[in-house]
Amino acid sequence: MTWQPSPTRYDTMIYKRCGNSGIKLPAVSLGLWHNFGGVDLLENARKTIWRAFDLGITQFDLANNYGPPYGSAEETFGVILSKDLRPYRDELIISSKAGWDMWPGPYGDWGSRKYLIASLDQSLKRMGLDYVDIFYHHRPDPETPLEETMGALDHIVRSGKALYAGISNYPAAETKRAAGLMRKLGTPLLINQPDYNMFERWIEKDLLQVLEEEGIGCITYSSLAQGLLTSRYFEGIPAGSRAARPEGELKREDVTAQAVGKAKKLNEMAKRRGQSLAQMSVAWNLRQKSVTSALVGASSPQQLEELVGALNHLAFSAEELQVIDQVLAG
Ligand code: NDP
């Protein structure tokens, strides 16, 4: 089947500048952590990516170990690229990462120059790409000198294997240090990728401010708390949901009565705003000026379509925000 993207794909998506850089990112980006592995159906993955691109989602977020098995999300994406998206490569921002465990032995984890450079080479092969747009160090490494890890990112960009460098899960102080090192090396950090959603607000303490000061963009991951901030679990744990699947990182015990109770209360507010809870969750992340993009996962094209509908109502009144805070504190 030959797929043609929609000619109207750029009509409604919002594109936000990433920090002080020249690049703009879609306000909603698609992540391939779950639902795109070797255990998932290729045709569903393919249709979800098609729908994403038709909705104006230009950014696809991967990592070396997304699957399962590790590496298989990149392989799936490589297949979809070669079948469908190859002519549109220059319209896409494709990212990958290294920093978590990937292969056995001392060189397949954390933040050494050896690991980052070898891992990116493997990722490029799996995806059939010459370069990624953004390459991230996936998590801080307490043992490797930050100079070495940032030196590796600088080298990777200079070698042409990535266009921009990013960091993920770096707290405020480490972000500031990393930003200083990269500035000196001449490869400014583009972006940080932390977790952020109504249930997980650590970045509000100081990271957002540092990102603003340093002119670095922010893409929030698990923007829906892996599905807890949607109506997915309102009637129990449905078959096929992330919490029901053995490989899902969301465990059955994470679907607590307290979390679902709060989600149901938040849903009342969402309804008053004329949105679904999933949509309000995306809008709530994007209310932060320094959040460039809300990164979401989706197990179907329909879910993604609903999420992008968040862009129809982004503004929150002070009173709405206060009620949300009260529900979250309750
Ligand atoms: P989310 O918090 O966005 O949760 C995604 C899940 O929510 C989906 O799989 C689906 O669950 C459910 N969902 C989505 N839309 C709807 C909807 N409209 N209605 C009901 N349920 C819905 O995402 P992730 O935790 O997957 O994170 C997003 C991305 O962030 C990842 O793919 C990855 O790229 C990145 N990430 C980065 C990390 C890092 O360390 N840098 C760590 C984790 C994620 P179901 O499958 O049950 O249908």
Image: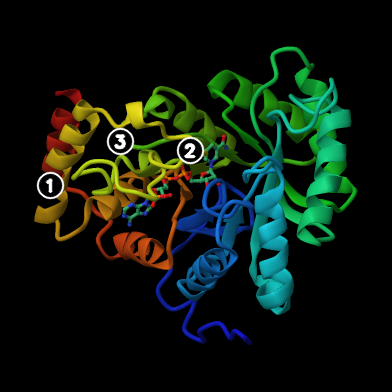
What is the number of the mark on residue 269? Answer: 1
- For the point 23% across and 41% down, which residue is it? 236
Density class for disc 3 (Cα within 10 Å; few <14, some 14-19, many ≥20) is some
**Of helix, strand and loop, which one carries label 2?**
loop
Q: Where does label 2 land, which residue? A: 246
Q: Give the Cα separation between the discs numbered 1 and 2.
A: 32 Å
Name the quadrant containing residue 326: top left
Under mark 1, the amino acid is Met
Picture colour scheme: rainbow
146 vs 19, nearest the viewer: 146
- Tell me the quadrant of the picture where the N terminus can be found: bottom right
- Tell me the quadrant of the picture where the C terminus can be found: top left
- For the point 81% across and 62% down, which residue is it? 128
Please report whichever mark, 3 or 2, sits nearer to the chain's N-terminal start. 3
Query: Is 37 positioned to the left or the right of 257 in the image?
Result: right
Residue 300 location in percent, x, y?
43, 62
What is the number of the mark on residue 198? Answer: 3
Residue 101 location in percent, x, y?
71, 28
Residue ranking furthest to the top: 143
Density class for disc 2 (Cα within 10 Å; few <14, some 14-19, many ≥20) is few
Tag 1 and tag 2, C-beta contact below 8 Å:
no
Name the quadrant containing residue 92: bottom right
| Number of the front mark, 1 or 2 | 2
